[in-house]
Image (cartoon, rainbow, N blue to C red):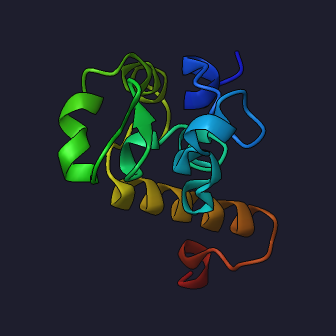
Amino acid sequence: MEKKNCWEFKGCGREPGGKKAAELGVCPATTYEGLNGAHDGKNAGRACWAIAGSLCGGKIQGTYAQKLHNCWRCEFMNMVKKEEDPSVHGFSHTRLGMDRTMSKDKLAKQTAQGNLEDPAKKNK
């Protein structure tokens, strides 16, 4: 099963080139590369709740603290949570949690490819 990004799930049309991008603007979740890969999404597509200014329910949402209350009731966020909870890393609703998970993944991939020495083997 392919994991969907928020704009694919909601069909808002606010992704670059989307049917409503010219009218409503491009949603920052579709272009924010800092969370690319979080919960296996494209840009912040599976972490939209952590992006200020994303559009949800036809309204521009505010800061993380202002919008999180609404996000907990969001069908999409709850779907991502349900999909990610059983995974190795689990679900994170915070930017810090997602950043830490992505850093661990990157380090594990580099170690597996032989680009970094495994710290556990170094001390043996």
Answer left or right for 106 relative to 91.
right
Asked whether residue 6 is in view, the answer is yes
Answer left or right for 46 relative to 15.
left
Which corner quadrant of the image does residue 19 belong to?
A: top right
Choose between 39 and 21: the one closer to the eye.
21
The image shows residue 9, relative to residue 36, as above or below, that is above
The image shows residue 33, relative to residue 45, as above or below, that is below
Which corner quadrant of the image does residue 17 belong to?
A: top right
**Residue located 70% across and 68% down the image:** 111
Question: Farthest bottom residue?
Answer: 123
Choose between 20 and 79: the one closer to the eye.
20
**Residue located 46% across and 26% down the image:** 80
**Residue located 19% across and 47% down the image:** 66
Residue 9 location (% of width, % of height) = 58, 19
Residue 34 location (% of width, % of height) = 56, 63
Choose between 80 and 5: the one closer to the eye.
5
Answer left or right for 18 relative to 67.
right
Question: What is the count of numbered marks?
Answer: 0
Answer left or right for 1 relative to 78.
right
Question: Farthest front residue?
Answer: 23
**Residue located 81% across and 65% down the image:** 113
The N terminus sits in image quarter: top right
Asked whether residue 4 is in view, the answer is no
The image shows residue 102, relative to residue 39, as above or below, that is below
Residue 49 location (% of width, % of height) = 37, 41
The image shows residue 60, relative to residue 107, as above or below, that is above
The C terminus sits in image quarter: bottom right
